[in-house]
Image (spheres, helix red, strand yellow):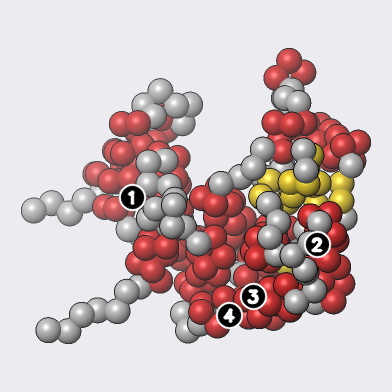
Amino acid sequence: MKYAAPTPLDYFATLVAEDESLNLLEAAISLAQDDHPRLDVQASLAQVDAFARRLRERIGPETAPPDRLRLLTRFFHGELGFAGNLNNYYAADNSFVHRVLETRRGIPITLAVLLLELGEQAGLRMAGVAFPGHFLVKCRIGLGEVVIDPFTGEALSASRLDELLAVYRQGSDLPNDLELPLEFFLRAATKRQILARMLRNLREVHRAACDWPRLLAVQQRLVVLLPGDAIERRDRALALQAVGANAAAAEDLVFYLAECGDAPDADALRDRLAELLAQRPKR
């Protein structure tokens, strides 16, 4: 009996099945497999491990955490030359870790994924921070934390973070009484949240290009990653309809409306569902 090889989506589903065993770097690298089906994920992992070995050679058992962090940022941004891709920020390649490894250019979240892995292997207590509009990394030093911009390697002061947050608040139109303190936005992101943000970035790239097949591939991953999230099922329904998969789109809309029947868009989506069901071939 012949067995079919697992698809990239099957592989991703295996990687993200359990929080306890979720390898953030491997799952992040695998996101590129829809566009790059021959991508060797293990080769990219080995490249990062080689970087980590070089870094660990400079760290002794007595090296204090502040010195480890300085060595990490100098190695990553200085010696290896990783930096933000200012010239082509919205390119899909910036969301593909293997391409960031090749070009040494990326967006904050892909650079952060690499920085987190190297930091962990260097013995640092680091976490990703889903800051609005610009992903950050923080490192526990003693009783405090240092917040790093992975785009530049800069350590951000509380006043600088407040400035960045003020820009977000001005553009979000939130009432003043709903403003949350800075600490709320500096909470550690889970691995699943980081992957979701990476995928949503990539989804917006494809949406801007009206590339519905690629957008659907990304949305399929979001549903696998967040299987109970009704909004991701709704968004998959819209992507499925865009490529003509009306029956599957209807199934997702039924799920969404069952979970979110009182949502502001529910009436419009009921109309859309009725149209999809009316288009089903009669038996």
Frontmost residue, 186 versus 58: 58
State the residue position of label 2: 63
Give the residue type at disc 1.
Answer: Ala
**Residue 195 image-quadrant placement:** bottom right
Q: Nearer the viewer, mark 3 or mark 1?
A: 3
State the residue position of label 3: 48
- Disc assigned to residue 249: 1
State the residue position of label 4: 46
What percent of the width, then of the height, locates residue 191? 54, 52
Ranked by sequence position, the earlier of labels 3 and 2 is 3
Q: Work out how far the residue at label 3 is from the one at label 1, CA to CA, in angstroms.
A: 39 Å
Give the residue type at disc 4.
Answer: Ala
Most extreme residue toward the front, as rendered? Answer: 62
Frontmost residue, 123 versus 207: 123
195 with respect to 153 (left or right): left
Q: Is residue 101 above or below residue 244?
A: below
Do the CB atoms of the residues marked 4 and 2 lie less than 8 Å apart?
Answer: no
Residue visible at 17% across and 84% down?
2
Ranked by sequence position, the earlier of labels 4 and 1 is 4
Residue visible at 68% across and 60% down?
123
Ranked by sequence position, the earlier of labels 4 and 2 is 4
Few, some or many residues within 10 Å of mark 1 (<14, 14–19, 20+):
many
Q: Secondary structure at mark 4?
A: helix
Residue visible at 80% across and 62% down?
63
**Residue 54 image-quadrant placement:** bottom right
Most extreme residue toward the top, as rendered? Answer: 177
Do the CB atoms of the residues marked 3 and 4 lie less than 8 Å apart?
Answer: yes
Q: Work out how far the residue at label 4 is from the one at label 2, CA to CA, in angstroms.
A: 25 Å
* Residue 234 seen by the camera: no
**Residue 207 image-quadrant placement:** bottom right
Give the residue type at disc 3.
Answer: Val
Q: Nearer the viewer, mark 3 or mark 2?
A: 2
